[in-house]
């Protein structure tokens, strides 16, 4: 039963990629990276699909660029591909392993940003929009970019970051390594503490995520 559901989600993602028909070969690159990730990191692929669909839903509700949110969600963890499967096999990782896992944000940024700068920046930022986060910083933005473009990257990255946490929390059994669950009990409380200035996005994302829970 579980596999039928997963296959249906994969088909939805394929359909979305084709529907959006992105520029500069991003459809092929995204499909290739998902297939590559599937070989050794099928859990990462499932998670990426889930984050992409939820990010798209949230962006639509917030009147933001749903195409940008979908592809940023789809490729936000692409940097994990270069790390060994054992880091993402569902066991509770130790501090050394967590230090390795943290490198995936910058790895994703480096892999994507020459070809797909917007999506690459979102990959680099998705863990750095909350306290004790990690990844790239504002100084890594292209110097020639105007404020409007930078604002859009931050908005889409915030949607992806929140959807990432929701998908991870609702689909994984492992403990949270960044301390988000200290002193709080519910997913909503965790998200409010983690994203105190973006509670509205949190509310929309939690509501949209209800349809993926079964
Ligand atoms: Fe990540
Ligand atoms: Fe993620």
Image (spheres, helix red, strand yellow):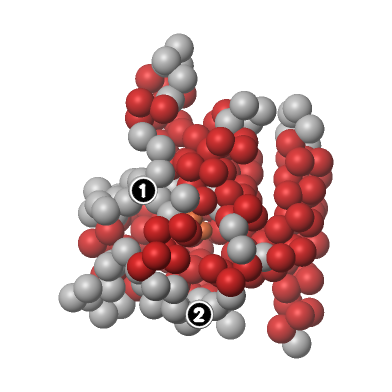
Residue 139 lies left or right of residue 52; in this view the side is left
- Eyeballing the image, is 212 above or below 19? below
Residue at the outermost front position:
96
Which residue is more in the foreground, 71 or 76?
A: 76
Crowd around label 2: few <14 · some 14–19 · many ≥20 (10 Å):
few
- Eyeballing the image, is 208 above or below 214? above
Q: Secondary structure at mark 2?
A: loop
Residue 106 lies left or right of residue 53; in this view the side is left
Q: Residue at x 62, y 38 (%)?
A: 111
Residue 211 visible here: no
User: What is the quadrant of residue 162 in the picture?
Assistant: bottom left
The quadrant in which the C terminus is found is bottom right
Residue 133 location (% of width, % of height): 32, 51
Q: Secondary structure at mark 1?
A: loop
- Eyeballing the image, is 4 above or below 193? below
What residue is shown with label 2?
91
- Eyeballing the image, is 47 above or below 102? below
The quadrant in which the N terminus is found is bottom right
Q: Residue at x 44, y 73 (%)?
A: 93
Q: Residue at x 50, y 80 (%)?
A: 91
Residue 203 lies left or right of residue 65; in this view the side is left
In the picture, the disc for residue 134 is 1
Which residue is more in the foreground, 81 or 174?
A: 81
User: What is the quadrant of residue 190 in the picture?
Assistant: bottom left
Residue 182 location (% of width, % of height): 22, 73
Look at the numbered discs 1 and 2 and tell me whether their residues touch, using CB distance below 8 Å.
Answer: no
User: What is the quadrant of residue 57 in the picture?
Assistant: bottom right
Residue at the outermost bottom position:
1
Residue at the outermost left position:
183
Disc 1 to disc 2, how far (Cα)? Answer: 22 Å
Residue 115 visible here: yes
Residue 199 location (% of width, % of height): 29, 55
């Amino acid at each position: 039963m579980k596999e039928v559901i997963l296959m249906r989600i994969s088909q939805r993602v394929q359909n979305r990629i084709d529907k959006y028909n992105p520029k500069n070969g991003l459809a092929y690159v995204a499909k290739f990276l998902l297939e590559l990730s599937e070989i050794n990191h099928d859990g990462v692929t499932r998670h990426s699909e889930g984050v992409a669909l939820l990010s798209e839903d949230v962006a639509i509700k917030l009147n933001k660029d749903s195409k940008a949110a979908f592809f940023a969600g789809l490729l936000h963890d692409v940097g994990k591909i270069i790390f060994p499967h054992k880091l993402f096999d569902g066991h509770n990782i130790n501090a050394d392993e967590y230090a390795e896992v943290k490198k995936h944000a910058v790895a994703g940024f480096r892999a994507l940003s020459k070809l797909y700068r917007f999506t690459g920046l979102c990959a680099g930022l998705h863990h750095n929009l909350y306290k004790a986060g990690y990844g790239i910083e504002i100084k890594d933005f292209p110097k020639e970019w105007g404020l409007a473009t930078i604002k859009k990257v931050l908005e889409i990255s915030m949607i992806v970051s929140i959807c990432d946490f929701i998908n991870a929390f609702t689909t994984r059994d492992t403990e949270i390594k960044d301390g988000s669950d200290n002193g709080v009990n519910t997913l909503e409380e965790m998200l409010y503490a983690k994203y105190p200035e973006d509670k509205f996005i949190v509310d929309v994302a939690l509501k949209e995520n209800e349809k993926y829970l079964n």
